[in-house]
Image (cartoon, rainbow, N blue to C red):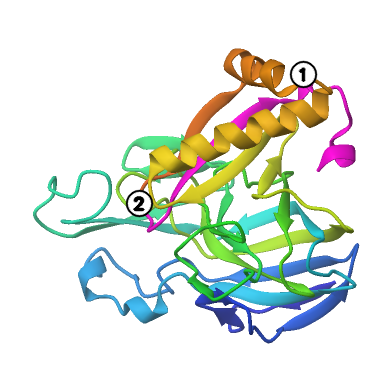
Amino acid sequence: MQTIGCDRHIYAFSTDLAPAASVPCGSRVRFDAQDALGGQVRAATDVLSGLDFDRVNPATGPLAVEDVHAGDTLVVTVESIEVDGRGVTVAGPGLGVLPDLLERHVTRILPVTSDAVCFDEIRLPARPMIGVIGVAPATGAYPTGTAHRHGGNMDTKEIGIGARLVLPVFQDGAMLAMGDVHAVMGDGEVCVSGCEVSARITVTVDCIAGRQRDWPIVVTDDAVHVIVSLPTIDAALEEATRQSVAILSDACGVPTEDAYMLSSLAVNLGISQLVDPNKTAKATIPRSILARPIDEWL
């Protein structure tokens, strides 16, 4: 199994990435990821205002996947996420959904076990997920802290162990990179951080040749989640709805008007994160209502 160490990382998804490693489709690969703060927080006295922001949000990679080309779809199956036993969360003035709430920067060091994150006496069930994961974009460059069609900082808690992430490919080789692992995070990531941890992520990479959807999609045991990241949450929710209607029309073989009504009956809109330059929404479609197998319409 190929391993990419945490010393091989990027800070932007761009069209001119050089691969850290290359593997054929069907390969298992391990990504060793630093925490989103670049390992700079070692104690509660290390607050966000004192960090070097040039070292924030490193994404391990990129990985070139052989025989994958622009116009294809990359399928990333998350086999495991092994997190370290120490997590960090930060907050401060000017940050998050309530930027005027705090008057000083604060940091918490959070013990992490195999099944829980400890916040003083409160034990939160651990649910490791990948905050930043994406491929090279069609044009230009996106900082790893920004999400769009290529993926990036989607901060979507459904991208966890057992999930399949489906990404449109814009450059040959796809150029996959990932990081910003959270031991646990609530929808919204409202204070600007989850439980930030370093981790070892094992994935399998596959390809669907010659077709792709417009936005990243996460497939879990019971649902399909369409992930849309745009400058406003209203725009992201609207586009996620539009995508869910198109998917239901394809997957259920019904006209647009029926798919629109079915979306209103069965699809749940949600928010992944509200704190990055592009806000991320998700449309969750129950797999139980999809008439055609997923691999036929992805």
**In front: label 1 or label 2:** 1
In terms of image quadrants, where is residue 179? bottom right
Residue 20, magenta (yes or no) = no
> What residue sits right under mark 1 in the picture?
289
Image height of 121 relative to 54, above or below: above
Find numbered disc 2 in the image and state the secondary structure of the residue it sits on.
loop
- What's the magenta region? 276-298
Depth order, front residue of 226/120: 226
> What residue sits right under mark 2 in the picture?
275
Classed neighbour count for the residue bearing mark 1: other residues with Cα under 10 Å, few (<14), some (14–19), many (≥20): few
Residue at the farthest left position: 103
Residue 68, percent from left and from top = 85, 69
Q: Can residue 222 be seen in this snapshot?
A: no
Give amino acid for label 1.
Answer: Ile
Q: Which residue is painted at 44% across and 38% down in the image?
A: 187
Q: Which residue is painted at 36% across and 35% down in the image?
A: 122
Q: Which residue is painted at 64% across and 57% down in the image?
A: 82
Depth order, front residue of 70/277: 70
- Mark 1 and mark 2 lie on one chain; the one further toward the N terminus is 2
Give amino acid for label 2.
Answer: Val
In terms of image quadrants, where is residue 295? top right
Depth order, front residue of 290/65: 290
Q: Label 1 vs label 2: CA separation?
A: 32 Å
Residue 251, percent from left and from top = 81, 29
Q: Can residue 250 be seen in this snapshot?
A: yes
Q: Which residue is painted at 63% across and 84% down in the image?
A: 16
In terms of image quadrants, where is residue 6? bottom right
* Position of residue 227 in the picture relative to residue 168 (left or right): left
